[in-house]
Amino acid sequence: MKITGVKPWLIKTAASYWGEFLFVEVTTDAGISGWGEITTTTYIANRALCVMLRQISKIIEGDDPAQIERIWHKVFRNFTYMGSRGAAVECVSAIDIALWDIRGKVLGQPIYELLGGPVREDILLYTHPDQRKFTSKEGVVQEIRDIIASGHTALKFDPFAQQGALDKNGIAREQSEGYLDGSMTRKDEREAAELTALIRETAGPDIEVLIDAHGRFDVPTAIRLCRSLEEAGDIDWFEEPVPPESINALKQVREKVSAPISWGERGHTKWDFVPILENNLADYIMPDVTWTGGITELKKISALCEAYYIPVSPHDAAGPINVVAGAQVMMTVPNFYRLETSEWNLGKYDHLIDKPLDNSNGTLKLNRAPGLGIEMNRDYLADNLIQFD
């Protein structure tokens, strides 16, 4: 069997917070395709990645798709002199996931059986409320109650003022403006604490409440916010308190707060996680399988974390492949905490895939279908394909 091509499928969809998903198909001369995905947040990144993927296709066409490790390094090292992180490793991730999908289909096994077999029956989740409903106290309370009624026992949200805000063109401010000055007004700090307190009061003491700062703050602001939310809502983790570029900034926050720190969605490959683990800078590690190097690398990062007795909790902010690829690996990982899902109702993916994802009672149940266990709806993808120059 030989690889015949890599095809990016950039589609428009209401299922994405950003309005787009980027799926990646690897085709073979045996008629078996594998699917991957890249989680992205900006339109320019999506389009740049499509161009890169088409060029990468040329260097792996004719390769044996079973040689997953060799292809991983072949693609990764082709970007050595321009920097093998960021977009480069995201392309590696998507192709790697697709190759594991192909391998599972060829052997008639789910991917988790190829990674050493399961150590659990299903995957414990944490999820997100729809913060567009947070327009009133009653809206917040109802959304949290609905999540708990669905069986979820952990939830994560971003209580800070810019979360979900749009600019004058209707584009998410996080996308159009990015990192600003890293600070926050006292009024916004107070409102974040009040929202966190309300959610903790509604959820009760037995639900885990996780905070996502999205790497948005400078050191003193992050310390102040974390302390405030610890007091207001007895939070169970504080995620990405500062931008990921400086581990010294993370170290300063870590030394000044008592809430557990979560880090890693913007960590690329095992090499980015080594200094975090060696310097005791996080209580939870949360790689994104579509960003950090795919299934191959997520398994290796998980093993690194196991050596430090640090739990792994894969990040998700995209489509169904992100969810199931992370779950396939976590089925085999002893030091697993929870898998993220970007919404608590996964029915938003139904039109994209051949069978619904089952997250009843706050756990994801993987079927025993080969590979990833899902197939993409080609008709929907074709009808919603984005063309660009």
Image (cartoon, grey):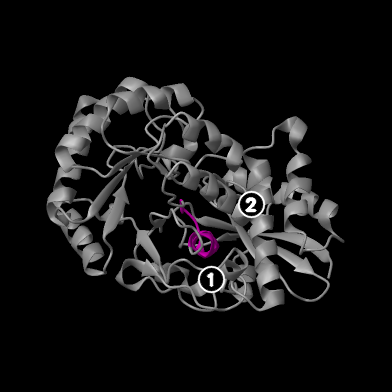
Amino acid at circle 1: Leu
- Residue 88's spot in the image, x, y percent? 68, 42
How packed is label 2: few (under 14 Cα within 10 Å), some, or many (20 or more)? many
Instruction: Tell me if residue 236 comes above or below residue 222 in the rendering.
Output: below
Which residue is rendered at x = 56% and y = 35% of the image? Answer: 272
Rendered image quadrant of residue 353: bottom right
The residue closer to the viewer here, 310 or 9, is: 310
- Judged by depth in the image, the label closer to the viewer, 2 or 1, is 2
Q: Main secondary structure of the magenta part?
A: helix
Is residue 327 on the magenta stretch? yes
Marks 2 and 1, the one that precedes in the sequence: 2
Q: Is residue 324 magenta?
A: yes
Regarding mark 1 in the picture, which secondary structure is present there? helix
Residue at image point 37% right, 28% down: 217
384 with respect to 81 (left or right): left
In the picture of the structure, the residue carrying the numbered disc 1 is 352
Residue, disc 2: 93
